Image: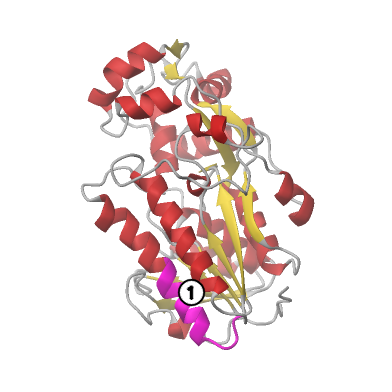
Amino acid sequence: MATIDPKAPVMVTGATGYVAGWLVKTLLDRGHTVHAAVRDPGNAKKRAHLDAMAEAAPGEIRYFAADLLTEGAYAEAMKGCELVFHTASPFTSEVKDPQKELVEPAQLGTRNVLEEANRTESVRRVVVTSSCAAVYGDNIDMRETPNGIFDEAVWNTSSSLAHQPYSYSKTVAEQEAWKIAEAQGRWDLVVLNPALVMGPGTNPFGTSESFALLRQFGDGTFKIGAPAYGMGVVDVRDLAEAHYRAGFTPEANGRNIIVGHNTDIREMATLLRERFGDRYPLPKRSLPKWVVWLVGPMKNKLLTRKVVNRNIGLPWKGDNAKGVRELGLSYRPLDVTLVEMFEQMAETGGFDKAKA
């Protein structure tokens, strides 16, 4: 049970990322010194939003160059830190080689960060951003769970390099984290398993897959109909708070599913249409499963017929009780998350190619 000195610096990997941006803001606003590990500290444009947050906050930010796949790259950034947040991991759907582009960066990156924690005497706790993708691969997996819901005891056993490779990468990366943590006794590991992360970014020009999904609502991709694809959603700001509490709550432990809402793409479309339906080509009806099965693979190579069969028309339910009970978490309404993200994207030209 780690008690963290709030005066000690805190390291954040992937500090310019979508999730990390709000975590860094949370830390800075509460007066912490953040060691921001980034690929290129000299890229003033990429870190501009972090600089602006630091300027307006009582905390301080220091940048360190660190490549996820280079052994020893985090030594300088981690020096003197008692708490390490590892948020850096690829989240992309367009990959040619899942092993090289997803699995290795996730697994080897996790190994590099945690083995550096082994070498850094000051470290007392590491918080790893895993994913609900390490809990399940497809919605149909919920039928095999002991309680008919995805909870922290469930592990993804249905994904592979050939099927749901992103989910597979998150699973092997988290397994690597637990393997390293359990082999030592100085620092403890807390893992967060968020559902799909949505909400406005600290960098309004974010490139996360979350923005890519919402863009499909605004640009007309879903105009003919929204598929009944069940999923969990969590606001990025609530996830940042979950990270903070996982880091500074001494009793925090184990895996923690972080999800605000059990929903699906149809409900998301309905909520957005109520606010933006007069300006954007948002879907007005549900897309039948047979249509998704027939057309989906031609529109999106990741939407294979196996994925359609195992997900479309099937609900998703995640149990967030542990985080609410042990970390005191609460969650924003889903419409607030979606509307504020959509508005941000609209203001920054995210739907300029909208199809009328």
Q: Residue at x 62, y 68 (%)?
A: 28
**Residue 113 in which image quadrant:** bottom left
**Amino acid beneath label 1:** Leu
Against 231, is 157 above or below? below
Is 234 left, or right, of 90 in this rendering? right
Count of labels in the image: 1
Q: Where is residue 177 in the image (x, y as percent from the top left)?
A: 49, 66
Task: Give the overall secondary structure of the magenta segment.
Answer: helix
Q: Which SS class for mark 1?
A: helix
The answer to whether residue 125 of the structure is visible from this angle is yes
Q: Position of residue 307 (x, y in %)?
A: 36, 29
Is 286 left, or right, of 324 in this rendering? left
The answer to whether residue 224 of the structure is visible from this angle is no
Q: Where is residue 261 in the image (x, y as percent from the top left)?
A: 63, 34
Does the segment drawn in magenta span residue 119? yes
Is 33 left, or right, of 120 in this rendering? right
Against 124, is 331 above or below? above
Q: Where is residue 26 in the image (x, y as percent from the top left)?
A: 64, 61
Quickly name the residue at label 1: 114
* Label 1, residues with CA under 10 Å away: few <14, some 14-19, many ≥20: many
Against 326, is 93 above or below? above
Does the segment drawn in magenta span residue 248? no
Quarter of the picture containing the N terminus is: bottom right
**Residue 185 in which image quadrant:** bottom right
The range drawn in magenta is: 110-123
Quarter of the picture containing the C terminus is: top left
Q: Residue at x 37, y 55 (%)?
A: 90
